[in-house]
Image (cartoon, rainbow, N blue to C red):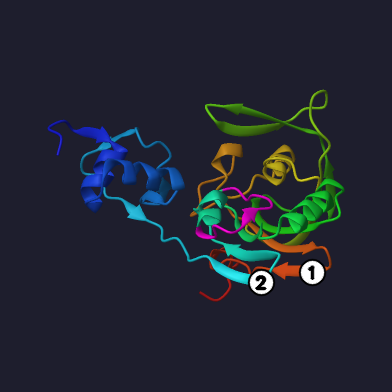
Amino acid sequence: MSKFEEEKAYKLLAIQEDISNSKAKDMIDKGIVYVSNRKVMIARGMLSVKTKFRLETIDKVKVIYENKEMIVVDKPAFINSEEIEKKYPDARLLHRLDRETSGVLVLCKDEDFRLKAIEEFKHDRVYKEYIAWVDGDVIEPFEINKPILTEKMNNKAKSKISASKGKPARTEVFPLMVVNHKSKVRLVIHQGRTHQIRVHLRSENLPIMGDELYGGRNARRMMLHAHKMKLLGREFTSPEPKEYKHIGGGDK
């Protein structure tokens, strides 16, 4: 232990969990390390040497559907889509979900099928439905139709609304529940730009809970879930995460 009163977060975590520094950094980057109820955002951030960490568990990847052309999985939060691809060496990702987004993720086992599916995405013929918890009251359906520009810095993407340089993006928003000025909403997206839902909702002052990159309040995770997809005549569904019930006052 350092003789100083503060030390880098990843080093303290490595000592507490008896793991390597690189493993500790990876866990912080995944978003599963907390101090009390606050997520540790910066691995190299300085913390008191007396800090006690809490770790979120990562659920197992579950297969929703599989045939000779594809494998559809229920992606847990806190894991990159690319990590799931490595679990299935004979399959390639058809699309991606953000690290903390859970739900339906499709990988292709057949190249002809993959190319056909990509065309469906390009022509907005894939139905993509999400469920999210946001800050604010959503009591009526509405649509967000704002172009999005994505920029990369230090190998990380961040998007914004840009009327002059952005690409077309449309998101339909439907209210499901309102509890204490927090709303559960159903979202149907078109085009599917990087961080589309996150940026669109933030532009309406309805940031997703847990999405601190785009102004959301602190939460156990980013409350965004890929609930349903319809692709080439097939429909795939992932049930709502258990965390959603705690917000809405459902069964524990």
Q: Give the residues in magenta.
A: 87-98
Residue at the spot 81% in from the left edge and 56% down from the top edge: 126
* Residue nearest the viewer, comparing 148 with 140: 148
What secondary structure prevails in the magenta region? Answer: loop
Pick out the residue farthest to the left: 3
Residue at the spot 72% in from the left edge and 42% down from the top edge: 196
Amino acid type, mark 2: Tyr
Report the quarter where the N terminus lies: top left
For mark 1, give the secondary structure: strand
Which residue is label 2 attached to?
65
Q: Position of residue 241 (x, y in %)?
A: 58, 66
Q: Is residue 94 visible?
A: yes
How would you rate the neighbour count of disc 2 (Cα within 10 Å): few for under 14, some for 14-19, many for 20 or more? some
Total number of numbered labels? 2
Q: Is residue 184 above or below residue 143?
A: below
Q: Looking at the rendered structure, which numbered label has been put on residue 234?
A: 1
Residue at the spot 34% in from the left edge and 33% down from the top edge: 44
| Residue 90 inside the magenta-drawn segment | yes
Q: Is residue 161 above or below residue 116?
A: above
Q: Are marks 2 and 1 in contact (CB under 8 Å)?
A: yes
Q: Position of residue 158 (x, y in %)?
A: 62, 33
Q: Is residue 62 above or below residue 167?
A: below
Quadrant of the rendered image containing residue 147: top right
